Image: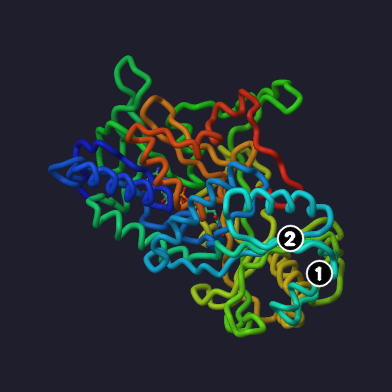
Amino acid sequence: MPTLPSHAKYAIIGAGIHGLSTSMHLAQKLAARGVTVGPGGTRIVVLDKTGIGAGASGIACGVVRNNYFQPAMRELMAHSVSVWESDADTYSYHPVGYMQISPEVMHAQVGTIYEQQKAIGYESVFVEGEAESMAYMKGLLSDWQARNITSVLHEKRGGYANNMASVRGLAAKARAAGVEIFEGVTVTGMRAAHGGGHIAALETSAGTLECDEIVVGVGPWINSIWTMLDLPKRIAIKGRDGRMNEGIPMWHYMALQEGTLGVDPDYQKTNDGAMPPVIHVDTDAPLHSDRDGALITDKLWGLYYKPDFHFGGVQGGAMPAPVERPADEVRVDPYGPKSPEFVVTDNFADMWTSALAFCQKRFEGQHGVYKKEPSGGIGCFTPDSFPVFDRFRENVYVIADSNHGYKMIGVGELVADELLGSPRALLSPFRFSRYAEGRLHPTSRSPFPWS
Ligand SMILES: Cc1cc2nc3c(=O)[nH]c(=O)nc-3n(C[C@H](O)[C@H](O)[C@H](O)COP(=O)(O)OP(=O)(O)OC[C@H]3O[C@@H](n4cnc5c(N)ncnc54)[C@H](O)[C@@H]3O)c2cc1C
């Protein structure tokens, strides 16, 4: 068992993308002010019950995009993309771009995304019309054949990063800046200060750690830390009609469905031999099985994919599946592919490989090389599926990204500023009070809860 210090100015729970990014930026910003970080100076301690990248960050598909219907999300993502770009090698970031390929029902909304990307200087191309979309896609990938597509938004920035490589890169930079990372230490409780709301110490499997400021970046485990903080499990949300909706569960889980087609990643190159952008397709054309022709769905559906050497094939996913159980009854551990409950099933494999074949002829008849290995993992979502970045109990900063936040590597930079007393406007649309005040983000027509 590692030996913890008795006191740290900053205690960060979770060594995923957010805990590590926050710790690194905080250490760098303190150093820039002439503060010594580390033993003997200001101590920033990261605690993880398992290890670096043991949560969602270590299994994420790694897609980095700006394509969000909510203006506040787009601005936040543009900031995060600039952090990915700032050290692409260390973060193992591949700036191949990203494409949102959509049916008519989403055309107008995606058009507004394009307009607003122009307004914030985020480079993208917007193609409209069925024939024009087909021609654009065939110009990139000659075997393109997806139907019911009437627009293509091609983001020139963004792409994907390799999950464990980027968190290890962050951890190395954090350590170099004086951050201490303790692996195998579980936070088991919070000790409130006498007569005060703030938390004076963390109870851990390695003893008590007194601290001044706490940052929570525990991804899918947020519900258990929320319980330790004694925060409300049900909340009131003011709807768009001005009426209060009482008793809404604060957290719910969904199972992310992802897998890999075991082809050579080079199999998915563009017409001119380059690595293609990450492709995301939504469509309302019926989807039939590539195995036996059976109808899989005639409702709006979607998929995303990219060739990826780290996963050893063409990797991607589809819409998440709801976990029909109250958050307190969901077993988060063992997490990810080790879970006996929340790995993808053969239904996903059939759907996703058929969807690939629907999009590109080269994938027809390839379902047999789908990698039959456990994949996918659960995520913990807020009521509106958008993040909560806020301070609770006076000194506890919660980073709850609603499970689409691997791409949000820059949030740690913004949180570090807030910890040092400088509020950041990019974070203010994500305060907890938005639910009670009815300051909700607009909702899109995408079949994905996070778009
Ligand atoms: C299959 C899958 C694919 C995804 N793909 C994408 C994608 O392509 N793009 C994207 O942007 N997002 C994606 N996401 C979402 C993204 O992975 C998460 O939103 C993000 O990684 C969360 O980061 P985090 O740092 O908050 O938490 P995590 O990475 O989950 O890290 C939390 C850490 O906290 C530790 N911990 C938990 N409880 C305690 C405790 N009590 N004491 C000590 N330590 C504790 C855990 O061990 C863990 O290491 C995906 C998620 C999944 C599951």
Image point (70%, 21%), residue name: 244
Q: Nearer the viewer, residue 272 or 47?
A: 272
Q: Nearer the viewer, mark 1 or mark 2?
A: 1
Q: Nearer the viewer, residue 245 or 79?
A: 79
The x and y percentages for residue 395 are 36, 29
**Residue 57 vertical placement versus 212 (above, below):** below
Q: Nearer the viewer, residue 76 or 335?
A: 76
Q: Is residue 299 visible?
A: yes
Apparent side of residue 167 relative to residue 444 in the rendered image (left or right): left
Three-letter code for the amino acid on which mark 1 is drawn: Glu
The residue beneath circle 1 is 132
Q: Nearer the viewer, residue 43 or 354?
A: 43
Q: Is residue 321 visible?
A: no
**Within the image, what quadrant is residue 209 found in?**
top left
Three-letter code for the amino acid on which mark 2 is drawn: Gly
The residue beneath circle 2 is 302
